[in-house]
Image (cartoon, rainbow, N blue to C red):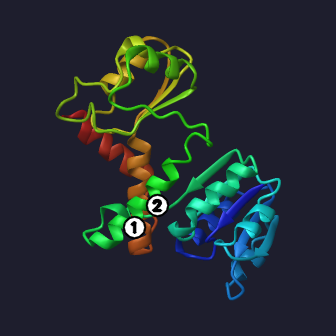
Amino acid sequence: MLYITGITGHTGTWLLKRLIAENYQGPIKCVLRKNSDTTLIDQSKLNIEKVYGDLDDMNFLMESMKNVKTIVHISWIMHSPKIVEAAIANNVNWAILVHTTGRFSKYKSASEEYIKIEESLLTLKDKMKIKAVGKKSNYETLKSLINDVDLLINATPVGMYPVVNKTPISKDLLAEHLFVYDIIYNPLNTQLLKDASEIGCKTLNGIEMFINQGALAFEWWTGTKPNTNTMKKTIIEILETK
């Protein structure tokens, strides 16, 4: 079951429309407030169960998350710690938190609040079975961790233009079973992706993410849906000339 918070908001409405367009067949549970406008939900013809409650109420979260496999939490970031705690307790497979980049706000009080929440979530990483490594991790630790995962994502700028000969992970640490995703789009084929391809890994660069986040922002601001195929063709042509 898919569990969604904030579905009547701006981002939530976009997600609901996407689920409708793709004729999503699975069961969905939407957490709502008493005064929520459920018109689109009611007209969607999707298999949606509406539940009303307070996301700050741990008992409500525990009860409403029973048999849930995936959570998409779009509502207020302040609810995230309890959402994650309840998800862990209910053995939820995936919890996707959709929030703003408030930690980078120029307003210090807002930034500090976001940072505090995100750090509180990181303290739950052991319960979530997330493996985190830092600068002090040695070779054997990294090798062991990489051998134990299926997906490796580079979310750093290491390897991005103009320093294109750098890689965040040395080639000898990679393993053939990995799917390696580098969110960098310039260059299209980073040193990490070259190394991964050479040893037989499946790979993906960041061009699709770059295009689709831009397309979505354009649609939100202008009300016009851009042609992503044209965007991709143009961007690739520009990048390949560098």
Judge left or right: residue 159 versus residue 40: left
Of residues 68 and 161, which is closer to you in this image? Answer: 68
SS at mark 1 in the image: helix
Q: Is residue 226 visible?
A: no
Amino acid type at image mark 1:
Glu
Give coordinates of residue 85: x percent, y percent: 65, 55
Residue at coordinates 44% horizontally, 20% vertically from top-left? 142
Residue with the mark numbered 2: 117
The amino acid marked with disc number 2 is Ile
Crowding at mark 1 (Cα within 10 Å: few <14, some 14-19, many 20+)? some
Q: Secondary structure at mark 2?
A: helix
Position of residue 50 relative to residue 227, above or below, is below
Give the residue pinned by disc 1. Answer: 113
Residue 62, image x, y percentages: 76, 61
Q: Quadrant of the C terminus?
A: top left
Q: Nearer the viewer, residue 102 or 166?
A: 102
| Position of residue 206 measured from the top left corner of the image (x, y, whole percent) | 39, 40
Res 159 seen here: yes
Residue sitting farthest toward the bottom: 35
Q: Quadrant of residue 164?
A: top left
Q: Is residue 74 above or below residue 199?
A: below
Numbered badge on residue 9: none
Q: Nearer the viewer, residue 164 or 22?
A: 164
> Is 67 left, or right, of 148 in this rendering?
right
